[in-house]
Image: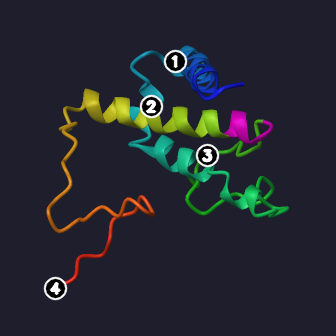
């Protein structure tokens, strides 16, 4: 699969998962609003870094960031569906913030945040 086809497939998977979540929680995502952003924590907990580091407990031990009053932390399969679910939890939180009127403005890089094209990471500003 080439990069464009993979990107389209990823977006299709995300949109399908969002439709499932909207079916469970409503289009306005009442669960996210009631839980005051816990979907962001749940999405962060779904991060795949532990499994990628060959951690056998990656989906057997509930991460501390996962909402403590939730049940059901589990694997949805490979890294792909786990990533899709995590991304969608975060999208639901972004949607809640937008509906609450939070400013969505993306800030530009400041002059002291120099870009290093060799690493793609910002250089630490030096005096």
Q: Compare marks 4 and 3 and give the one earlier in the sequence.
A: 3
Q: Is residue 79 magenta?
A: yes
Q: Is residue 89 magenta?
A: no
The residue to which callout 1 is attached is 22
Q: Compare marks 3 and 1 and give the one earlier in the sequence.
A: 1
Q: Compare marks 3 and 2 and give the one earlier in the sequence.
A: 3
Disc 1 on helix, strand or loop? helix
Q: Residue at x 57, y 20 (%)?
A: 8
The residue to which callout 4 is attached is 127
Q: Are marks 4 and 3 in contact (CB under 8 Å)?
A: no
The residue to which callout 3 is attached is 70
CA distance separating discs 3 and 2 = 16 Å
CA distance separating discs 3 and 1 = 18 Å
Q: Nearer the viewer, mark 4 or mark 1?
A: 4
Task: Determine the main secondary structure of the stretch shown in magenta.
Answer: helix
Count the numbered circles shown. 4
Disc 3 on helix, strand or loop? loop
Q: Which residues are magenta?
A: 77-82
Q: Residue at x 81, y 56 (%)?
A: 60
The residue to which callout 2 is attached is 92
The C terminus appears in which quarter of the rendering? bottom left
Q: Nearer the viewer, mark 3 or mark 1?
A: 1
């Amino acid at each position: 699969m080439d990069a464009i086809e993979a990107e389209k497939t990823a977006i299709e998977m995300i949109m399908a998962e969002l439709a499932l979540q909207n079916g469970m929680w409503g289009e306005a995502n009442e669960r996210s609003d009631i839980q005051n952003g816990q979907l962001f924590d749940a999405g962060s907990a779904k991060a795949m870094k532990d499994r990628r580091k060959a951690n056998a407990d990656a989906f057997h031990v509930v991460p501390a960031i996962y909402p403590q009053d939730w049940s059901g932390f589990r694997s949805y399969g490979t890294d792909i569906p786990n990533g899709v679910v995590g991304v969608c939890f975060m999208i639901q939180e972004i949607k809640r913030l937008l509906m609450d009127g939070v400013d969505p403005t993306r800030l530009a890089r400041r002059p002291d945040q120099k870009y290093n094209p060799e690493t793609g990471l910002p250089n630490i500003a030096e005096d």
